[in-house]
Amino acid sequence: MITTTMVHVRVDEQIKTQAAATLATMGLTISDAVRVLLTRVVADQQMPFAIEAPNAETRAAMAEADEIARAHSARFTSADALFEDAPLTPTA
């Protein structure tokens, strides 16, 4: 039989709550996600994702993308309302 050990992690309460909700949509718990992470670290001898800080050019592009998304984020209560607001001809 495999023996297990406890891992205690300090994390912001809001992050924990949001992560638990997101993982639940995948059928996972936080414990499941940590087990998956640690298993991959052992198997691959590295993190299963890149940990890098974006450079200045990438940060500027990300900020621009956020700005564009905010400027074009209309909300509609129905499909009819969306189509009423949409232009009749495509724009470039």
Image: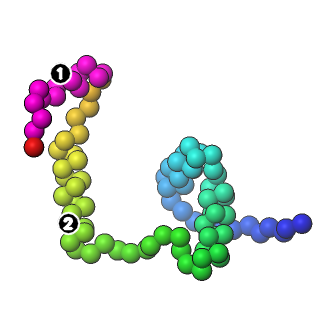
* Residue 9: percent from left, percent from top: 61, 66
* Residue 53: percent from left, percent from top: 35, 74
Q: Secondary structure at mark 2?
A: helix
Residue at 10% from the left image edge and 38% from the top image edge: 91
Q: Is residue 79 magenta?
A: yes
Q: Amino acid at mark 2?
A: Ala
Q: Is residue 64 left or right of residue 16?
A: left
Residue at 57% from the left image edge and 50% from the top image edge: 23
The residue carrying pointer 2 sits among few (fewer than 14), some (14 to 19) or many (20 or more) residues within 10 Å by Cα, namely few
Q: Is residue 47 magenta?
A: no
Q: Is residue 15 left or right of residue 38?
A: left
Quickly name the residue at label 2: 60
Residue at 10% from the left image edge and 43% from the top image edge: 92
State which region is magenta: 78-91
Count of numbered circles on the image: 2
Labels 1 and 2: the sequence-earlier one: 2
| Whether residue 17 can be seen here | no
Q: Are marks 1 and 2 in contact (CB under 8 Å)?
A: no
Residue nearest the observer in this picture, 57 or 91: 91
| Whether residue 65 can be seen here | yes
Which residue ends up furthest to the right in the rendered image?
1
Asked where in the image residue 8 lies, by quadrant, the reply is: bottom right
Which residue ends up furthest to the bottom in the rendered image?
45
Q: Is residue 12 left or right of residue 29?
A: left
Residue nearest the observer in this picture, 8 or 69: 69
Residue at 16% from the left image edge and 26% from the top image edge: 85
Quickly name the residue at label 1: 84
